[in-house]
């Protein structure tokens, strides 16, 4: 065990949990109508709790167990046989478990943005739990757990390069979000502006800070690689914020706060897969492109395809993660065959599993709330609470 590595990953684990609670909850909560803000908080909080238990029970062993190239097996259910002296590299394995658990929390939580203001709470919990176990955890094993997409797999000695989750986190969550949005259909009332842009900015800032643990921690060591990952993460986020705001100003005559901080998230998602393989100049380029490209993706999904991915999960996270994954090959840090092939394999798998799960889960519990609940707001009808005295 290395004490410095262990100390850093303890901090990184806390930072990644901070991304979901309260970062993502505030970012998403500020973007919805006032009558639905508590439902968004509830979704994020409940998902964090449920994924933690499921990761302990089955998720970790599926992702990082000693199985074959496709499945980790069930040998480490409930961390059976894993003690404080067992190591994963230079870290206590129980710490590696906890760090990866925070990724298993935020990935299904990202999907929340696609279905806010109209989804059934039971559907959120049942779908998220099954999706994490049957979609996310197997993909983790394929890419990070020594599976068939990793080094020595189907792409030869140099497998796919995905440092912190362009494929594993952002592609899977983005595609799942898009599919659920299609199944749900649009909101009855979708033109109301964000009820609290201040929440959105605070949440985005928390995500930005937490992302240092997300990307920097993925080095799994306290060394120069972690420092570089942290640095390029910041540069990409800053650059994408500026290009998003500039593009908004050129197109609409105004640069908005919500737009600028959405650009931050686009830059963070885009650098995530590449953060262990590029330097500051490449990060500048990735961020500069991401701020414009993801904004245009929002326009395509929302206005051209008429899909109500409410908080633009696919356009920002899905497109950003896929873009960053490809840029690894563009900058010569990975092979195009491995990057594009893995994106295709994981993409098809995610779509199939998500579609099947939506059909199964909505047969058990309603996918969408009724029209009266949607109109009155999920906060008071579903959860019996209001965020404000006069929620609009």
Image: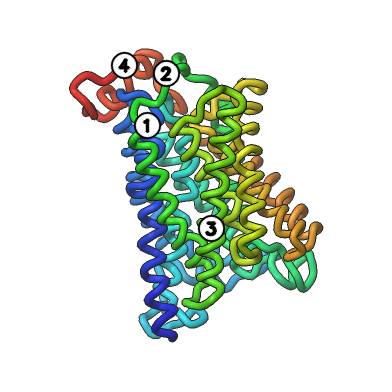
The residue under label 1 is: 197
Quadrant in which the N terminus appears: bottom left
Up the image or down, 370 lies above or below 264; here it is above
Q: Position of residue 248 (x, y in %)?
A: 57, 30
Of discs 1 and 2, which sits in the foreground? 1
- Element type where label 1 sits in the image: helix
**Label located before the other in sequence (1 or 3):** 1
Is 241 on the left-hand or right-hand side of 338?
left
> For the image shown, how many numbered marks are present on the structure?
4
Q: Nearer the viewer, residue 11 or 171?
A: 11
**Label located before the other in sequence (1 or 4):** 1
Q: CA distance from mark 1 to mark 2?
A: 12 Å
The residue under label 3 is: 233
Query: Image point 46% across, 40% down: which residue?
Result: 261
The residue under label 2 is: 192
- Element type where label 4 sits in the image: helix
- Element type where label 3 sits in the image: helix
């Amino acid at each position: 065990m290395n004490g410095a590595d262990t100390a850093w990953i303890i901090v990184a684990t806390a930072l990644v949990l901070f991304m979901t609670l309260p970062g993502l909850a505030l970012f998403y909560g500020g973007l919805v109508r006032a009558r639905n803000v508590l439902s968004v908080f509830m979704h994020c909080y409940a998902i964090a709790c449920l994924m933690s238990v499921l990761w302990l029970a089955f998720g970790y062993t599926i992702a990082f167990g000693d199985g074959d190239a496709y499945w980790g097996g069930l040998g480490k259910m409930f961390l059976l046989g894993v003690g404080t002296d067992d190591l994963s590299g230079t870290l206590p394995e129980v710490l590696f478990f906890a760090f990866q658990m925070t990724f298993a929390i935020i990935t299904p939580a990202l999907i929340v943005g696609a279905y806010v203001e109209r989804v059934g709470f039971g559907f959120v919990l049942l779908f998220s739990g099954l999706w994490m176990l049957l979609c996310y955890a197997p993909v983790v094993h394929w890419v990070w757990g020594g599976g068939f997409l990793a080094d020595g797999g189907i792409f030869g000695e140099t497998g796919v390069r995905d440092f912190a989750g362009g494929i594993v986190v952002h592609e899977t969550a983005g595609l799942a979000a898009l599919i659920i949005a299609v199944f749900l259909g649009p909101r009855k009332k979708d033109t109301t502006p964000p009820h609290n842009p201040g929440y959105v900015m605070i949440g985005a800032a928390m995500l930005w800070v937490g992302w240092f643990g997300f990307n920097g921690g993925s080095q799994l060591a306290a060394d120069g690689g972690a420092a570089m990952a942290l640095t390029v993460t910041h540069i990409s986020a800053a650059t994408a914020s500026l290009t998003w705001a500039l593009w908004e100003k050129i197109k609409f005559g105004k640069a908005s706060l919500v737009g600028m901080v959405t650009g931050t998230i686009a830059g963070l998602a885009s650098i995530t897969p590449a953060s262990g393989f590029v330097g500051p100049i490449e990060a500048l380029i990735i961020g500069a492109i991401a701020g414009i490209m993801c904004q245009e993706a929002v326009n395509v999904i929302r206005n051209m395809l008429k899909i109500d991915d409410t908080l633009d999960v696919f356009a920002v996270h899905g497109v950003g993660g896929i873009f960053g994954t490809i840029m690894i090959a563009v900058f010569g840090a990975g092979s195009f065959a491995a990057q594009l092939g893995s994106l295709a394999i994981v993409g098809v798998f995610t779509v199939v599993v998500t579609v099947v799960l939506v059909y199964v889960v909505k047969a058990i519990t309603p996918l969408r709330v009724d029209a009266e609940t949607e109109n009155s707001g999920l906060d008071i009808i579903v959860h019996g609470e209001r965020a404000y005295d006069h929620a609009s």
